[in-house]
Amino acid sequence: MKFYKKALLIAFLFVLVGCAKNNSTPQTQKVSDEGNVVVTNNSDNANDYKMILLDGKYPTSKTRGASLTLLTPVNIAEFEVGLTDLSKIQFPANQYYFLEGQYLPNQDIQKWLQVQNGENPDGLNKSNTPKAISTILEQDYMLLVDNGYELNGVSIGIALNPQVNDTLLSDNNLLELGKEAATKIVERIRTKEGMGNIPILIGLFKQSIDNGASRGSYLSYAVSKSGVSLSEWKPVNVEKRLFPLDNDKTDDVSVFSTFKKSVESFFPNLNGIVGEATFIDGTMSELNITVTTQFYGQSEMIALTQFLVEKANAYSASNLNVKIKVESVRGTEAVIHKKQGETVFHSVVLH
Amino acid sequence: MKFYKKALLIAFLFVLVGCAKNNSTPQTQKVSDEGNVVVTNNSDNANDYKMILLDGKYPTSKTRGASLTLLTPVNIAEFEVGLTDLSKIQFPANQYYFLEGQYLPNQDIQKWLQVQNGENPDGLNKSNTPKAISTILEQDYMLLVDNGYELNGVSIGIALNPQVNDTLLSDNNLLELGKEAATKIVERIRTKEGMGNIPILIGLFKQSIDNGASRGSYLSYAVSKSGVSLSEWKPVNVEKRLFPLDNDKTDDVSVFSTFKKSVESFFPNLNGIVGEATFIDGTMSELNITVTTQFYGQSEMIALTQFLVEKANAYSASNLNVKIKVESVRGTEAVIHKKQGETVFHSVVLH
């Protein structure tokens, strides 16, 4: 019940922005909408942002759908979640509230994603690499100031497509194009009302080009504290690895292989166990395992789930996020999971 | 780590049954297989049975596949889990271990499910209701005795099909057919080695006849402590209700409707929220909710999940099992769950 009460912290806000003259340059921008602001509760994971719900609605992103090339669902998820993760460096999740991008209009972004020419001077793409900059994502980070939620940070994700006109661009090519676009974007954001002096974080995301399960990842990020200058670009050392890999003999792979063999030896009807690990600066931080099984019976599903919970303790390092999905032709049958900081696995059999 | 150690209780057993003469009548039957017996750990839910893994394998049911009419997946799940739940009355989960049916051979069950006639005297079905008795399921319940797992209980589920030759059989018809079959099954089980004197529980399950989401349920059960007599048949008062129901004004429905409205008002992209509640003797014991949403973005999925966790506290009665699935065209996106006895919800966003 304590979650519930804490979460129903409702702040009634009045339109402050509307009172400002158009030609003035307010230093801050308040979330209002003449309605209620509600924030979600994140008690289940202290590492997650609380999210802002405006006027009885979840405020979807203004730039949603502004995409030149269709990202695969796993790319979309990684592009969004990766930007949120980078943002935690600059806008700590225990202080800031999350809001999907509300300030850059969709029609602006649509123009920015086109090729620059006489008709469209705002285009960020060049005629020889017309679709390299394929998506731009805005996320807003708010602080609770005087009972109002105030915009105090913006993160911009730039998704780069390494495959342009059937040629592959190198990471260096992509970084060069992305940094140039980032500089222009910061300049344009600074002219927007309420965004003249807030910190802006820019992340450069490299899409994965096959349409399979592999995900893209962020290559680099920089921050503009104020004005149009960007700080030094820092590399994002995030690596995704698929397990099992025969030619990989590291400890992580060996632990995974032991887990896989142990489960497979007791459950003859499994069709496969694969893992996707995320490494940050060389250290595994997340492991997502998918166990695919034929569906025979509910008792077997319960036994398999109990068994997976036991064996997952081999991965019980408390700094690791672990999700294990059991899949059959019916869809997801069971989930076993543990968040960073937890030592106990939770499990649920769905049907 | 404590789970792990406790779970790896491995008992090396020797073949005791094999030493007995064929014409003797042993009072007990030990699980062996000349190999290891491992049991799974159920620390995640004290109400679940620990399950027995034999000789490095999950021992699938011997009668698996012995089915006259194809049950829908939700019927299969309910038929199995319902029998396990009934068994807890007779074979408490904190004393007994679960093993899928190992004693009734598949070819016997196949004969039993046919119509009785000169060629097949063992058939349990009659010529005027040829497919009424459509599936028979065996579950074995073991006790740990002198470091060995000993068969000490058998549960038999009889699935009844209310639709025979395009006519519908009433519950009373089904019960009559089921009880007659149960008596014959108990007589036959008593002749099997090691099963002469153990308690046998028989449950009569009524299949749902549409192929949609609705599930069948158990109508009645009885126990044979020893010998061929069955105790009084007791009704199983389990009711499944789908929420929301406009013509249902009970408190449970009203709480669900409040939950549904509250979630729908904040998340404009939801395609529907439906619930399936299980009532035992008129009291809700389980609630499974499916939230169907279009997939837009990962941030919205995280916000929706956080919001659902908060709102789910309206159902925080500790005696209630709650599972909330968020589904999109991509499959299961997130799961929020709480077991009976727990007061805190766990949540996981899958992609």
Image (cartoon, coloured by chain):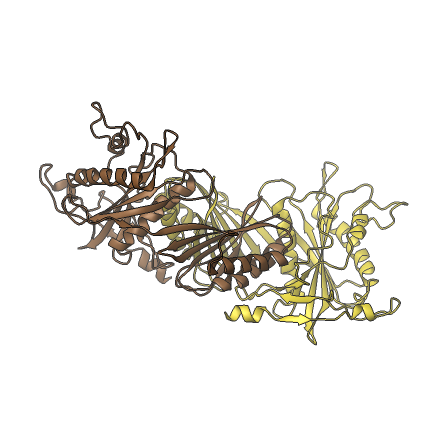
Chain colours: A brown, B yellow
Relative vertical location of residue B310 with respect to residue A208 in this rendering, above or below: below
Q: Residue at x 51, y 71 (%)?
A: B2
Side of B84 relative to B198 (left or right) = left
**Percent coordinates x, y for residue A5 in the rendering:** 33, 59
**Percent coordinates x, y for residue B180 in the rendering:** 79, 53
Q: Which of the two residues, A222 or B120, is positioned nearer the viewer here? A: A222
Q: Residue at x 42, y 43 (%)?
A: A74
Side of B291 relative to B156 (left or right) = left
Relative vertical location of residue A191 with respect to residue B66 in this rendering, above or below: above
Please, which residue is most extreme toward the bottom here?
B146
Please, which residue is most extreme toward the right here?
B118
Relative vertical location of residue B15 with respect to residue B302 in this rendering, above or below: below
The quadrant in which residue B220 appears is bottom right
Q: Which of the two residues, A264 or B196, is positioned nearer the viewer here? A: A264
**Percent coordinates x, y for residue A131 in the rendering:** 32, 31
Residue A91 visible here: no
**Percent coordinates x, y for residue B243 in the rendering:** 50, 46
Side of B19 relative to A183 (left or right) = right
Q: Which of the two residues, A246 or B86, is positioned nearer the viewer here? A: A246
Q: Residue at x 52, y 56 (%)?
A: A348
Q: Residue at x 60, y 56 (%)?
A: A264
The quadrant in which residue A57 appears is top left
